[in-house]
Amino acid sequence: MDTLVVGIDAACRPVLDPLFEDGTVPTIERVVESGTDGALESQVPPWTASAWPSLYTGKNPGKHGIYDFITFEGYDWRVVSATDLREPPLWQLLDDQGCSSVVVNAPVTAPVRPFDGALVPGYMAPADPDCHPKGLLDDIRAAIGAYSVYPEHTGETVPIDEAREAYRRLTSMRGEAFRYLADRFDPDFGFLQFQQTDTLFHEYPDEPGLIRDVYAAVDSEMEQVLTDCSPDTVFLVSDHGMGPYEGYEVRPNEILRQEGYVSTTRSGTGMPTWSTVRDSQLTAGDEDTEPTASAVERAMATLSTVGLTSQRLGRVCRALGIEETVRDLVPSSVVHAGTERVDFAGSDAYVRSRVELGVRINLDGRDPEGTVSQGEYEGLRQSLIGLLESLEAPDGTPVFEEVTRREQYFHGPAADEAVDIVTVPNEFDQFISATVGTEPFGEPSEPWNHKRNGIIAATGEGIDTGVTPDTAHLFDVAPTVLATMGVPRDDRMDGRVLPFATPVGEAQYDPRKETDVEATEDAVVQERLSDLGYLE
């Protein structure tokens, strides 16, 4: 194997350094210490579904088209898939240059498109995804035993020991599948990603023992891959960092409602929540989905005004192990009554999804029922920027370190799909929520979440270990990987070849290859997003 990329989701020095000190991850430490390493600045937004495509295409979301775990068509939403990816990933570019690849667990790669090699999709794929070549998943299971994309406890909270074993099994599956495919296909390039290093912080925050165990499992699999595959060059990369949130939960929609920009609803369109994801499964085929007035519903609606939203109720039920009972006994209309949501069509400006990190203006001529005219657009955008720039948390600290037009971050054919105003949280220490109906500020729903800086380390042939990548960006990974394989950079890439590798020039590549394979909806994917807090 010429070059191997190992992706460890959410890896960063604040997480890794204590593991280096206690000897938990000797293989990862060896890769870092034997080569060159530095912080890898993530993009905005620094979340899995958008950041990994940026890493493996070398392009900003305005070009590749994925901003979030979900995508909007008008005011309606659906979970993203590889059909939304508009730019070719590394393995397609290498295919154009006559190089083969094996890719295991890369996010947003289902449905698969053909290339020379093999691919097993990762996060955002259905629970039993089609692989490339067809029938490959059956071959993998026959060769190594069980293989799954998501842990068995998707959608529920289980005891930490049970979660630890589930994480270990998933980690082992990734390594075993990759080694089997590398032996079978003998690729020039390998891409292996581990997701549980991110998941554990969302599901079991503040559990240092679990962090050590999951990272130790990743380290063990990585050691076996390096031994069996003997790559000439190794990259260790992450899509973002991870750390504690010590600021506030900030609810811009509530602030925008108080300023008269946001209207709300308890039915119809609006950002999906814990209840709407589950209601869509519970009421499938049910003609009568309108809530009826009752004392219980009125009580639930009253509780929502003091912060007991259906999202928080859901988390409490899962923590107590009574979610299934509540789901069976409590009518969906009762849950709806406690969920006040933004009415997209009736609002002038709003936060659609917290992961987008920004505000969308309901623009006439672009949005189905736009309320803001083209002539009013820039004036409103500037007013909103001024409002959000001056926003302070209760302790007097600024909520945002930057509030700016989307053009500062996104450019390309898909730039119009981005938020109109980008809001970057101050030091990524303020937890942004799209909920509405409670106070503008509160305690963070999750004590740990994403930080801007991940990590990049490289070692092996063609790596100048005397050069440190002091200003490495997520977009730089793809062109640098190509350079180590003697392959020219795609001239549409936003990233550059990092100075520890030798550029090979530029080339024009074919655009994203189309396929007649359609995206598949999978309830497990929605359940997983909700379970991790990405759907509020």
Image: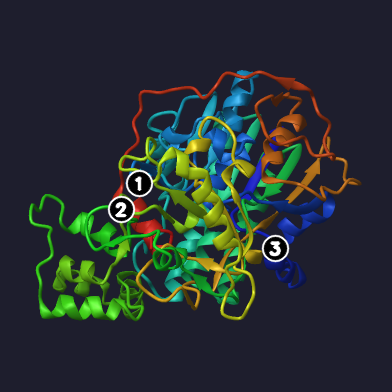
Q: Position of residue 432 (x, y in %)?
A: 50, 65
- Amino acid type at image mark 1: Thr
Residue 175 visible in the picture: no
Give the number of the disc on residue 308. none
Q: Which residue is mark 3?
A: 25
Residue at left offset 22%, top offset 66%: 336
From mark 1 to mark 2, how far is it between C-alphas?
Answer: 7 Å
Q: Which residue is mark 2?
A: 346
Mark 1 / mark 2, whichever is N-terminal: 2
Give the number of the disc on residue 371. 1
Using the image, determine if residue 131 lies above or below residue 388: above
User: Which one is in front, 532 or 270?
Assistant: 270
Tell me, yes or no, whether the two marked residues, 1 and 3, touch with CB atoms within 8 Å: no
Q: Quadrant of the N terminus?
A: top right
Nearer to us: label 3 or label 2: 2
Residue at left offset 57%, top offset 56%: 385
Dot 3: few (<14), some (14–19), or many (≥20) neighbours within 10 Å? Answer: many
Q: Position of residue 262 (x, y in %)?
A: 37, 60
From mark 1 to mark 3, how far is it between C-alphas?
Answer: 54 Å
- Judging from the image, what secondary structure is the residue with disc 2 in? loop
Dot 2: few (<14), some (14–19), or many (≥20) neighbours within 10 Å? Answer: some
- Amino acid type at image mark 2: Gly
Tell me, yes or no, whether the two marked residues, 1 and 2, touch with CB atoms within 8 Å: yes
Q: Position of residue 43 (x, y in %)?
A: 63, 48
- Judging from the image, what secondary structure is the residue with disc 3 in? loop
- Amino acid type at image mark 3: Val
